[in-house]
């Protein structure tokens, strides 16, 4: 059972990146998934989450209108499209998934997640 996060990198302010979170060893069909980020010296912050059917999505206020979470259950992968990136978006981004039938996404504490991927570093700098 593994989640593999990828897609991080160096981007200029205003640029875009797409993060991927690929699951192996289990099916994501019954799992809600989310993205968190942690900048140096700061606590892990919930960025976005998506329900198992993709009918429910949550975004932190800091990323609303700029980030879009999506999933492709056939590919067992969750994505985070990040546009109009700002220096304050720089962080290590982590994906996590939890088995839940809940479709109305809100803030889900990280301790409730069943699986975590390794982080992928996003750097926003000119």
Image: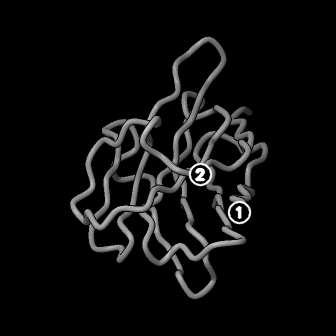
Colouring chosen for the image of the structure: one colour
Residue at image location 35% in from the left, 66% down from the top: 51
Mark number, residue 23: none
* Apparent side of residue 30 relative to residue 121 in the rendered image (left or right): left
Query: In the current view of this chain or complex, which residue is farthest to the right?
Result: 9
Answer few, some or many: residues within 10 Å of disc 1's Cα (few below 14, many 20 plus, some between 14 and 19): few
Residue at image location 66% in from the left, 63% down from the top: 20
Residue 108 to residue 101: above or below = above
Query: Would you say the residues marked 2 and 1 are in contact, meaning their CB atoms lie under 8 Å apart?
Result: yes
SS state under label 2: strand
Mark number, residue 1: 1
Q: Percent position (x, y) of residue 112?
A: 42, 42
Name the quadrant of the N terminus.
bottom right
Query: In the current view of this chain or complex, which residue is farthest to the bottom?
Result: 74
Q: How far apart are the two marked residues, 2 and 1, measured between alpha carbons?
A: 8 Å
Q: Percent position (x, y) of residue 9?
A: 78, 47
Name the quadrant of the C terminus.
top right
Q: Percent position (x, y) of residue 7?
A: 74, 57
Residue at image location 44% in from the left, 42% down from the top: 47
What count of labels does the image hold?
2
Picture quarter containing residue 57?
A: bottom left
Query: In the current view of this chain or complex, which residue is farthest to the left?
Result: 104
SS state under label 1: loop
* Apparent side of residue 118 relative to residue 81 in the rendered image (left or right): right
Q: Percent position (x, y) of residue 17?
A: 65, 56
The residue beneath circle 2 is 115
* Mark sitting earlier along the chain (2/1): 1
Answer few, some or many: residues within 10 Å of disc 2's Cα (few below 14, many 20 plus, some between 14 and 19): some
Residue at image location 34% in from the left, 42% down from the top: 108
Residue 6 to residue 39: above or below = below
């Amino acid at each position: 059972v593994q989640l593999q996060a990828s897609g991080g990198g160096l981007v200029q302010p205003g640029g875009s990146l797409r993060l991927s979170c690929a699951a192996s060893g289990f099916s994501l069909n019954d799992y809600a998934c989310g993205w968190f980020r942690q900048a140096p010296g700061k606590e892990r912050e919930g960025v976005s989450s998506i329900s198992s059917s993709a009918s429910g999505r949550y975004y932190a206020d800091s990323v609303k209108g700029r980030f879009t979470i999506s999933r492709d259950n056939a590919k067992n992968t969750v994505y985070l499209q990040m546009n109009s990136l700002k220096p304050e978006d720089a962080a290590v981004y982590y994906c996590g998934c939890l088995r839940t039938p809940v479709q109305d996404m809100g803030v889900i504490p990280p301790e409730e997640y069943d699986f975590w991927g390794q982080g992928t570093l996003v750097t926003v700098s000119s």
